[in-house]
């Protein structure tokens, strides 16, 4: 049996990171591989960190949450969710407290998620050479649906990283990316066109194969607001609250707590999908919030952000690839109009079906 490692964002505490790791692991196991997750050493951040490391970072994040404009009880729920996240959900992936650095493998798969996003202020990642295949002990090195996130080629040149990354990336046996920005960087730095594959949360058939997803959550008449805590502005929360009231819906926040939160939902990742499946509609500004809306066939809109820690590159690219470009929300004032337009998923489902075949073909070829 082929010994395969996945080097990804599996220890990052959010549902999207968990589900993409879980999905890729199960795809590889379906292909007959003995799969384990591989860890990396977080490097120094290229740009100033967003709150230090270790306990200092955790305390600063708690203080940040307490400042958010949200019900106090729900903020406490969120803090408890973060505190217990790893102990509750890491075991589903077979992770333990013991880190797994540079194991001997037949194949190392880097990805999915923003594994190449090296210019960011998250000290849990930083600039880590291991995320580009350095210090590995594998016979073969490939990536799957890897992303540079909002790291651009212009930023790489600004910080003098292009030559180093060019050498490292040329050492890959095959490179698969998930978005246009990442593909263009790879092509310019290596001279080779990468393969484009969709995220594992789309490529693994969660709705058809995952028996851990319950049919019902015991709730009705609610909408989901899915995003990182505090990222929805006061104006956005006012409009979302107005829309929810007009439809007689409760606002359930998942992933983060927001100003218009009726309740913060703290459940396992599979139950999160069930909450999506049973929601009246979804508002999100995240990549995986969009994907969970798609695989559960929800009425949704994706808020596009072009300032701060923007999402426009990856979100616009994702919606375009799924033929759902019209679900992008550039101004919260258009929320009622966009939610009033019913989504037909026929074309999107055909795209996902075809892309699943391409995913399995790519992995078979390079395994």
Image (cartoon, rainbow, N blue to C red):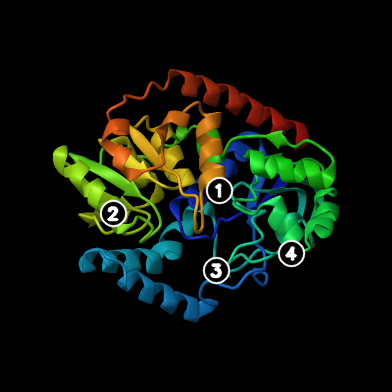
Which label sits in the foreground, 2 or 3?
2
In which quarter of the view is residue 276 placed? top left
Viewer can see residue 204? no
Sequence-first tag of 2 and 3: 3
- Labelled pair 2, 3 in contact (Cβ < 8 Å): no
For residue 235, the mark is: 2
Q: Quick check: 164 above or below 334?
A: below
Kindly tell me whether residue 151 is visible in this rendering. yes
What SS does tag 2 mark?
Answer: helix
Residue in the foreground of this view, choosing between 128 and 136: 128
The residue wearing badge 1 is: 21
Per the model, the C-alpha gap separating discs 2 and 1 is: 34 Å
Q: Viewed as shown, does residue 262 lie left or right of 225? A: left
Q: Position of residue 284 (x, y in %)?
A: 38, 45
Within 10 angstroms of label 4, few (less than 14), some, or many (20 or more) residues? few
Which of pointers 1 and 4 indicates the residue nearer the eye?
4
Secondary structure under tag 1 reads helix
The answer to whether marks 1 and 4 mark residues whose Cβ atoms lie closer than 8 Å is: no
Q: Residues within 10 Å of mark 1 (few under 14, many from 20)?
A: many
Numbered badge on residue 97:
3
- The picture places residue 340, in percent across and down from the top left corner, at 27, 28
Q: Residue at x 80, y 52 (%)?
A: 138
Q: Answer few, some or many: residues within 10 Å of disc 3's Cα (few below 14, many 20 plus, some between 14 and 19).
A: few
Residue 332 against residue 46 in the figure, above or below? above
Determine which residue is flagged by label 4: 159
Quarter of the figure that contains the N terminus: top right
Q: Residue at x 52, y 60 (%)?
A: 12
């Amino acid at each position: 049996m082929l010994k395969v490692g996945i080097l990804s964002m599996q220890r990052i505490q959010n549902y999207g990171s968990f589900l993409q790791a879980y999905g890729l692991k199960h795809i590889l196991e379906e292909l007959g591989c003995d799969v384990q997750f591989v860890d990396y050493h977080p490097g120094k951040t290229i740009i100033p960190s967003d709150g230090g490391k270790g306990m200092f970072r955790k305390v600063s994040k708690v203080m940040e949450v307490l400042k958010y404009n949200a019900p106090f009880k729900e903020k406490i729920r969120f803090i408890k969710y973060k505190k217990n996240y790893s102990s509750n959900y890491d075991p589903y992936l077979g992770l333990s407290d013991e880190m797994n650095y540079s194991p001997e493998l037949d194949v190392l798969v880097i990805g999915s998620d923003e594994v190449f996003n090296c210019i960011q202020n998250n000290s849990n990642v930083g600039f880590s050479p291991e995320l580009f295949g350095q210090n590995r002990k594998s016979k073969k090195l490939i990536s799957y649906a890897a992303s540079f996130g909002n790291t651009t080629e212009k930023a790489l040149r600004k910080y003098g990283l292009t030559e180093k990354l060019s050498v490292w990336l040329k050492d890959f046996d095959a490179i698969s990316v998930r978005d246009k920005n990442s593909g263009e960087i790879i092509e310019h730095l290596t001279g080779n066109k990468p393969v484009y594959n969709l995220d594992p949360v789309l490529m693994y058939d969660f709705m058809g194969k995952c028996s851990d997803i319950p049919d019902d959550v015991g709730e009705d008449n609610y909408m989901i607001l899915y995003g990182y805590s505090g990222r929805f502005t006061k104006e956005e929360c006012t409009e979302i609250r107005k829309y929810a009231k007009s439809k007689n819906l409760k606002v359930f926040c998942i992933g983060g707590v927001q100003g218009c939160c009726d309740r913060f939902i703290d459940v396992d990742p599979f139950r999160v999908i069930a909450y999506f499946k049973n929601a009246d509609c979804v508002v999100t500004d995240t990549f995986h919030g969009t994907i969970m809306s798609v695989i559960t066939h929800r009425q949704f809109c994706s808020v596009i952000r072009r300032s701060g820690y923007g999402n426009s590159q990856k979100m616009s690219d994702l919606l375009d690839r799924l033929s759902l470009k019209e679900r992008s929300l550039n101004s919260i004032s258009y929320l009622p109009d966009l939610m009033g337009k019913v989504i037909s998923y026929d074309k999107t489902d055909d795209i996902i079906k075809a892309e699943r075949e391409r995913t399995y073909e790519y992995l078979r070829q390079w395994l």
